[in-house]
Image (tube, rainbow, N blue to C red):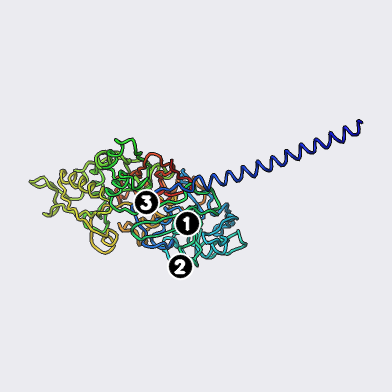
Amino acid sequence: MLKNWNVQRKLGIWMVLAACILALIGCAGTEETSTNKGTKEESSDKKATLAFSWSPASLDPHGSDSWEIMRSGTAETLIKLNEELEPTAWLAKSWKQENDTTWVFQLQENVTFHNGKVMDATSVKESLQRSMDKNQRAKDLLQIKSMEAVSDTELKIKTIQPNAALIASLADPSTIIVDVATIDAKDSYPAFTGAFKIKQFNQDESLIVERYEDYWGEKAILSEVTIKFIADANTRLMALQSGDVDGATDISIDNIAVLEKNKKFEVLTATSLRTHMLMYNMESPLFKELALRKVVDMLIPREEIVSSVMKGQGTVAHSPFSPVLPFGKVENKEETESVNQLMQQEGWKKNAKGMWEKEGKPFEATLLTFPQRPELTVMAEVIQNKLLAEGMKVNIRQVENIDDTLANEDWDLSMYSMLTAHTGDPQYFLEIFYRSNSASNVSKYTSPSVDRMISQLSQTTDFEERNQLAIGIQEKINEDIPQSYIVFPNTVFAVKDGLKGFVAHPVEYYYNHSQIDVE
């Protein structure tokens, strides 16, 4: 009897356990199905429309439109910059430096391109090689001598010379990873690796992207995002107000107050890594002398410009890099000599009309500006009036292509704007803008000591040492004044109530991403 009871008891226990196991399996299956269903079905009808100011001329990620492609949420690089602007893993999950010129990257193992092809070291090598062949910026940033696919998930890169900025440079959009065979395909779009894939591209009008179901990371909440390209700021504002778009980038400063009065909209700002500046041509007869550059720099009313022109959407700049960066914390040193002292040292005297003149010739300079960034023209007018009040005449000339004019014509002064730390590292901007032999050194600035420090920076891998070197370079540049830094402008976005996750970011190419949602 006891034996039968034990048998029955064991049988009952096994039946209960079996039931529990089946229930657990059922729950697990139901939960997984429910989770997947919730991810795919509940969000399948969620769509959003965004307005961007710049339209790509093509979808080639290695041409001049790499930034616009990165902004679409379809493409990725080996490295990504986090909110603190530090290089972090993306398509490369880890890396190590074997010696001064050799780096080994371990790639994510479960990544596929949008055509289903597996991303491996060979395809990454082909993509990076094409980016360097097609884009001079990528070639200058990476300085790669050779690449080797050691295995499917391991890529070895050797640089021409020590390049301590290699990791940060691999976050540049010019290094987007793509299946190169798909770029020129006539019957399909380029296959990238992002959370969204390209559905439809209408040049100068829109780009429609849809969720990539086999994405290796966190799947997109939205099933589809339509990106409208609207160049005019007022038209973007009207599209937002009318409900044609859910969010818009590059909101005009003058339009912020209008949106803030309406609770249906939210204005989003972030300190950008851009710098608005005044450049001097150091081959100009007027500004080859440091004293006159000092005078103009002293007379720029930076606080007034931030308040009146920028409406408070920016901070005063006294160096190339924003103080949000560890290498941007440069101390501002006030000039000890007065305008009169500096002018008189160089032989200038005030005439009967209160204007400065030298050897019978009045001080008269030309200041270039351009229409693509209208706030710069307003700044130029403020500077013009300030200098005129001090007896210095400045004529403003607006040109359509500022870079062509700076490279091919004579000029004295020019307004300019640069994203000075787009990889979160100082090396690239310092290299191209201040090295004596750089083609991009449009101010014709020459300093052997700065050249030596830039060379030292390129070979320094310690984070703190790099920051201190970059600060030292800026301090020397500030002594020589090839440019006057005026303001670090804010990035300004606006969204309708209910759009979540679309935020302004200091780096100007992480716009659309997987966690944007609409309520």
Q: How many marks?
A: 3
Say which residue appears at 32% left-offset and 41% top-offset.
314
**For discs 2 and 3, the disc positioned in front in the rendered view:** 2
Q: Which mark is residue 419?
A: 3
Question: Image quadrant for the C terminus?
Answer: top left
Helix, strand or loop for disc 2: loop
Q: Type of residue at label 1?
A: Lys
Q: Where is 87 relative to 122, above or below?
A: above
Helix, strand or loop for disc 3: strand
| Along the line of sight, the residue nearer the viewer: 511 or 95 | 511
Mark 2 surroundings within 10 Å by alpha-carbon count, few (fewer than 14), some (14 through 19), many (20 or more):
few
How far from the left and from the top, in percent, is residue 492?
34, 44
Answer with left or right where residue 127 lies relative to residue 495. Answer: right
**For discs 3 and 1, the disc positioned in front in the rendered view:** 1
Q: Type of residue at label 2?
A: Asp
Answer with left or right where residue 43 lies relative to residue 152. Answer: left
Looking at the image, tell me whether mark 3 or mark 1 is earlier in sequence order: 1
Helix, strand or loop for disc 1: strand
| Along the line of sight, the residue nearer the viewer: 265 or 408 | 265
Answer with left or right where residue 507 lies relative to residue 232. Answer: right
Looking at the image, tell me whether mark 2 or mark 3 is earlier in sequence order: 2
Q: Which residue is mark 1?
A: 197
Q: Type of residue at label 3?
A: Leu
Q: Kindly report the distance in space between the C-alpha atoms of the residues bearing marks 2 and 1.
A: 15 Å
Marks 1 and 3: in contact by CB < 8 Å?
A: no
How far from the left and from the top, in percent, is residue 262?
31, 36
Q: Which mark is residue 187?
A: 2
- Asked if residue 273 can be seen in this view, the reply is yes
